[in-house]
Image (cartoon, grey):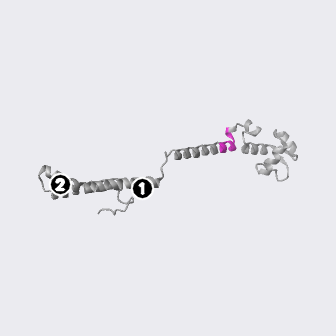
Amino acid sequence: MPELTASTREAARRLGVSDTAIHKAERAGRIAREPDGQWDIDKTRRRLIETADPARSPLASSAGADGTPFARLKVAQLALKVEAQRLSLDETKRRLVDVTEANAALDEIGSTMRDALLNWPARVAGLIAAEISVDPHLLQTILQSHINDLLTEAADRFDPAGLGGDRSPQP
């Protein structure tokens, strides 16, 4: 049978807290009277322990602060705060990179490399042809063909058909 009392002071005395603490907890919605207006001591004690701040409540510390839902919430809240501070510090120290900026930088590097490779046969074909005594135009055509094959292979490896980009799939 539940232990009931109509008096807030008596409930506070049995719980080992002040009647002000009972009034504050009731106003905050942490505890409530029974429908008949009485306090169920066991039920009120459980609710006070579940919702108590371990640093401030004698009830929470006696129940093992790590076990209360409030204590777990405080630990989770602290962990989120620490994580937010860590991310902010990483961003300040430039350890984090914006995805849009990173993609733009990679696109720029890739475009520069592609352009350099595409222009290379025209720049070196005459020099190589003179060294080995072959037709410069034929050598440039062969080099361009091999460079195009290399770029196509690299493009397929880094951007397979159907995953994006502006290339249409090859039949």
Q: Residues within 10 Å of mark 2 (few under 14, many from 20)?
A: some
Q: Residue 13 location in percent, x, y?
A: 85, 40
Side of 14 where 170 appears, left or right: left
Gap in angstroms between the C-alphas marked 1 and 2? 35 Å
Q: Quadrant of residue 72?
A: top right
| Callout 1: SS | helix
Residue positioned 12% across, 54% down in the render: 134
Horizontally, is 41 left or right of 160 in the view?
right
Give the amino acid at mark 1. Answer: Ala
Residue 142 locus on image (x, y percent) = 19, 56
Q: Which residues are magenta?
A: 66-74
Disc 2 on helix, strand or loop?
helix
Q: Is residue 73 magenta?
A: yes
Q: Position of residue 114 (x, y in %)?
A: 31, 55
Which quadrant would the C terminus be assigned to in this image? bottom left
Task: Identify residue for label 2.
Answer: 126
**Quick one: 53 or 132, which is closer to the camera?**
132
